[in-house]
Image (tube, rainbow, N blue to C red):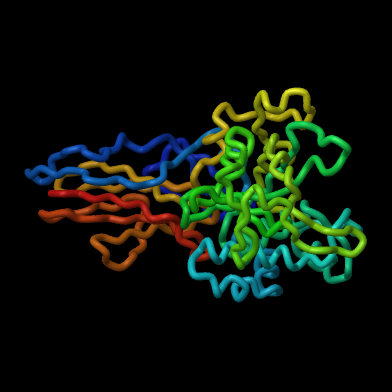
């Protein structure tokens, strides 16, 4: 078996099955009852008061992605050798733990600059760091992606390029990442080189959102959050000093750093310790802002705010009346999927298949569903509230 397609979610409700490393893709389930719908249930009337669930999405962009396998022994070695579970254990919640991992990766690198060793993948890079070798942003990103994968999170590499060549030279490209946050139910940019994520109104942003705020709203509402201490800066505070490295000088977040979000390239694989970056299937976002600057020629999504930002680790819900029960169908795009879990009216979480027959007594009742991967990481909970 190909190790990168293990752990697929098998659903008896699925048709047109295509295994793609994160679950079985299918045609949509039977049309679902929506919020506000009224239906017959065992001779009485019931109403759907609430449906709060991320959708299941299949597109040409979801099909490009290949995720690392829970069975990959290199992930286990990385997690155990560097005690990554202990690194993130102090976190108050999932996002805090992801920030702790981001900070840890940043501080593993003791020298910064052009690579002085040919190291492929997180294990080799970290060994070379311990031998005194120099690396830069690409290797930071590689280590963070695989460290996250070893803990059951999905992080992906982004290749960035300025919308215009910088006057007087200087850096024009950068590698960063986006991690899937179950807590925030979205992709979030995390830059391990700068131990940085960016917020607006307290919500961490993805790369496209950052791009829009920077170029179209002058970055006035952006908050740059640095390190596990969560030090916060505004645009007016740039540059942000990060450290001094022998042979390189000061590493900073310069005042024009976000100009590198002019082009965004999405690298559609996370199995970096085995395969390297899949540039062949990379897709990019660009628009008139980029006119006059040459970069990679790749497919560009028609809807850059949504096409690259498909949800994962969800429990998409379909509601179908069936006699005296309400059938709850579940779909997910979860790398290394293990099981669904449901709970009713605040009871304990219990494993279930891709369909749950919900027997609803008179009154108002709540059902929650979530997907759990082979690392034991639970996705965001979907919620359905019914009144009978």
Is residue 1 visible in the rendered image? The answer is no
Relative side of 298 to 218, left or right: right
**Residue 46 appears left or right of 181:** left
Question: Is 294 drawn above or below residue 247 in the view shown?
Answer: above
Query: Of 244 and 124, which appears nearest the observer?
Result: 244
In the depicted structure, whether residue 312 falls above or below residue 289: below
Quadrant position of residue 288: top right
Frontmost residue, 126 versus 6: 126
Q: Is residue 11 left or right of residue 310?
A: left
Whole-percent x and y of residue 116? 91, 58
Which residue is at a point 58% across and 62% down the rendered structure image?
98
As displayed, is residue 325 above or below residue 259?
A: below
Q: Residue at x 16, y 49 (%)?
A: 387
Residue in view at x 64 percent, y 29 percent: 300
Which residue is rendered at x = 68% and y = 39% of the image?
Answer: 261
Q: Position of residue 191 (x, y in %)?
A: 67, 54
Q: How many marks?
A: 0
Q: Please say whether residue 343 is visible from this viewpoint.
A: yes
Can you give x and y, in whole percent of width and height, for residue 93 in the image?
48, 66
Q: Residue furthest front?
A: 236
Q: Is residue 205 above or below residue 216?
A: below
Percent position of residue 127, x then y: 82, 68
Q: Quadrant of residue 284?
A: top right
Which image quarter: residue 362?
bottom left
């Amino acid at each position: 078996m190909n190790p990168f397609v293990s752990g697929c979610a098998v659903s008896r409700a699925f048709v047109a099955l295509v295994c793609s490393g994160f679950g079985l893709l299918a045609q949509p389930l039977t049309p679902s009852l929506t919020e506000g719908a009224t239906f017959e249930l065992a001779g009485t009337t019931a109403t759907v008061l609430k449906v709060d669930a991320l959708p299941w999405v299949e597109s040409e962009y979801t099909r490009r992605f290949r995720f690392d396998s829970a069975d990959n022994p290199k992930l286990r070695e990385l997690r155990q050798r560097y005690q990554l579970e202990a690194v993130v254990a102090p976190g108050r919640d999932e996002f805090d733990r992801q920030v702790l991992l981001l900070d840890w990766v940043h501080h593993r690198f003791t020298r910064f600059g052009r690579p002085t060793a040919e190291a492929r993948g997180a294990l080799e890079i970290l060994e070379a760091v311990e031998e005194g070798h120099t690396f830069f942003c690409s290797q930071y990103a590689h280590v963070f992606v695989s460290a996250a994968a070893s803990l059951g999170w999905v992080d992906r590499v982004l290749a960035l390029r300025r919308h215009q060549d910088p006057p007087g030279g200087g850096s024009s490209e950068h590698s960063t990442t986006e991690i899937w946050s179950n807590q925030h139910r979205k992709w979030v940019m995390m830059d391990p080189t700068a131990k940085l994520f960016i917020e607006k109104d307290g919500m961490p942003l993805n790369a496209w959102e950052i791009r829009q705020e920077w170029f179209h709203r002058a970055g006035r509402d952006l908050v740059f959050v640095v390190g596990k201490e969560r030090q916060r800066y505004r645009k007016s505070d740039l540059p942000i000093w990060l450290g001094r490295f022998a042979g390189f000088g000061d590493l900073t977040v310069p005042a024009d750093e976000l100009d590198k979000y002019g082009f965004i390239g999405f690298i559609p694989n996370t199995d970096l310790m085995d395969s390297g970056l899949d540039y062949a299937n990379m897709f990019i976002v660009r628009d008139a802002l980029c006119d006059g600057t040459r970069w990679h020629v790749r497919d560009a999504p028609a809807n850059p705010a949504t096409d690259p930002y498909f949800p994962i680790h969800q429990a998409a819900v379909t509601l179908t009346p069936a006699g005296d029960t309400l059938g709850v169908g579940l779909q997910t795009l979860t790398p290394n999927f293990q099981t669904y879990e449901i709970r009713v009216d605040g009871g304990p979480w219990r494993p279930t298949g891709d369909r749950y027959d919900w027997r609803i007594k008179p009154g108002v009742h709540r059902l929650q569903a979530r997907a759990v991967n082979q690392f034991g990481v639970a996705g965001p909970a979907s919620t359905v509230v019914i009144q009978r």
